[in-house]
Image: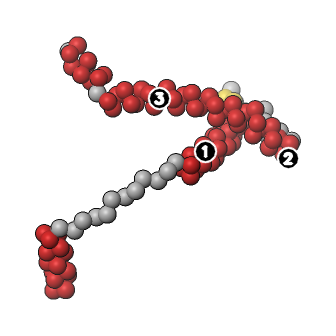
């Protein structure tokens, strides 16, 4: 069982996933900081602040804090948009890989001709 676990851990996919999760959490902290300390205050200049956490709905003994949920949705949309812009910028700056031309073998050509003939028969 330990040998199997060692093989599982030493596979590249698990290591890559672990690195991705660690970098993702660090990136999340950066994006949250960007949104909380730069973008939200900038938006707050125009809307007068975006804090709906006081909005609640009370039904009997139950309290529904839909304002906090609305804050979370707004923060998610802002974070998603910022991540979209960052990914778009990174894709623009990253050199594109050259795509190798597709080589059509005689067998493939023959199969395409057979396919086309069969289409014509229908």
Packing grade of label 2 (10 A; few <14, some 14-19, many >=20) is: few
Identify residue for label 3: 21
Q: Secondary structure at mark 2?
A: helix
Q: Position of residue 92 (x, y in %)?
A: 56, 52
Identify residue for label 2: 46
In the image, residue 78 sits, relative to residue 11, either above or below, namely below
Packing grade of label 1 (10 A; few <14, some 14-19, many >=20) is: few
Q: Please state, as top left, top right, bottom left or bottom right, where the C terminus lies in the image.
A: bottom left
In the image, residue 121 sits, relative to residue 82, either above or below, namely below
At a point 20% along the width and 80% down the height, the residue shown is: 116
Q: Between 105 and 60, which is closer to the camera in this rendering? A: 105
* Mark found first going from the N terminus, 2 or 3: 3
Identify residue for label 1: 86
From mark 3 to mark 1, how far is it between C-alphas? 18 Å
* Mark found first going from the N terminus, 3 or 1: 3
Check the image and name the residue furthest to the bottom.
Answer: 121
From mark 2 to mark 3, how far is it between C-alphas? 36 Å
Q: Is residue 122 visible?
A: no
Q: Between 100 and 4, which is closer to the camera in this rendering? A: 100
Q: Quadrant of residue 41?
A: top right
Q: Which of label 3 and label 1 is nearer to you?
A: 1
Q: Secondary structure at mark 3?
A: helix
Q: Position of residue 6 (x, y in %)?
A: 26, 18
At a point 19% along the width and 86% down the height, the residue shown is: 120
């Amino acid at each position: 069982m330990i040998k199997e676990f060692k093989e599982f851990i030493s596979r590249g996919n698990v290591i890559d996933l672990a690195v991705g999760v660690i970098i993702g959490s660090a990136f999340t902290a950066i994006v949250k900081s960007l949104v909380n300390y730069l973008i939200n205050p900038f938006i707050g200049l125009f809307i007068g602040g975006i804090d709906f956490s006081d909005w609640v709905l009370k039904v009997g003994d139950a309290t529904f804090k839909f304002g906090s949920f609305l804050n979370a949705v707004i923060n998610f949309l802002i974070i998603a948009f910022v991540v979209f812009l960052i990914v778009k910028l990174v894709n623009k700056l990253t050199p594109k890989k050259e795509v190798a031309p597709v080589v059509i073998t005689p067998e493939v050509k023959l199969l395409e001709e057979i396919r086309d003939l069969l289409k014509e028969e229908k």
